């Protein structure tokens, strides 16, 4: 049995946010809220696919497992999305 993965159409929204530098609020399944810029995605051994994310007021990137995402809300105006439910 394979590990669960994020649906392709939802992954596309993460890629759009990275490509167009769209500032977002992420709500995680844990209830935590993160604000900043998505940078890219990568696979991390033992964790799976992660979103590399730069939180506002931080100089270092953070890796967030994509399966821990609950919602992504655009702060920056864009024509691609307002809110995405994962």
Image (tube, helix red, strand yellow):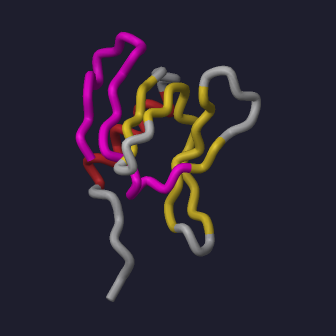
In the drawing, does residue 60 fall left or right of residue 76? right
**Magenta span contains residue 82:** yes
What's the residue at 26%, 22% (across, down)?
82
In the drawing, does residue 47 fall left or right of residue 73? right
What's the residue at 39%, 44% (across, down)?
28
In x, y percent, where is residue 41?
54, 49
In x, y percent, where is residue 58?
70, 28
* Above or below 58: residue 31: below
User: Total of numbered circles in the picture?
Assistant: 0
Give the position of the N terminus as an image quadrant.
bottom left
* Above or below 25: residue 43: below
In x, y percent, where is residue 26?
41, 34
What's the residue at 42%, 27% (across, down)?
25
* Above or below 80: residue 70: below
Specify start and end residues of the magenta stretch as a single range: 64-86
| Residue at the outermost front position | 31
In x, y percent, where is residue 19?
50, 30
| Residue at the outermost bottom position | 1
**Magenta span contains residue 9:** no
* Above or below 45: residue 15: above
What's the residue at 33%, 58% (across, down)?
6
Q: Quadrant of residue 59?
A: top right
In the drawing, does residue 42 fall left or right of residue 73? right
| Residue at the outermost right position | 59
């Amino acid at each position: 049995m394979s590990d669960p993965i994020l649906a392709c159409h939802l992954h596309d929204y993460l890629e759009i946010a990275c490509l167009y530098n769209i500032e977002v609020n992420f709500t995680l399944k844990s209830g935590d809220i993160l604000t900043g810029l998505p940078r890219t995605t990568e696979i991390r051994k033992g964790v799976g696919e992660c979103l590399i994310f730069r939180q506002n007021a931080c100089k270092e990137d953070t890796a967030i497992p994509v399966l821990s995402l609950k919602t992504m809300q655009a702060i920056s105006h864009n024509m691609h999305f307002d809110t995405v439910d994962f």
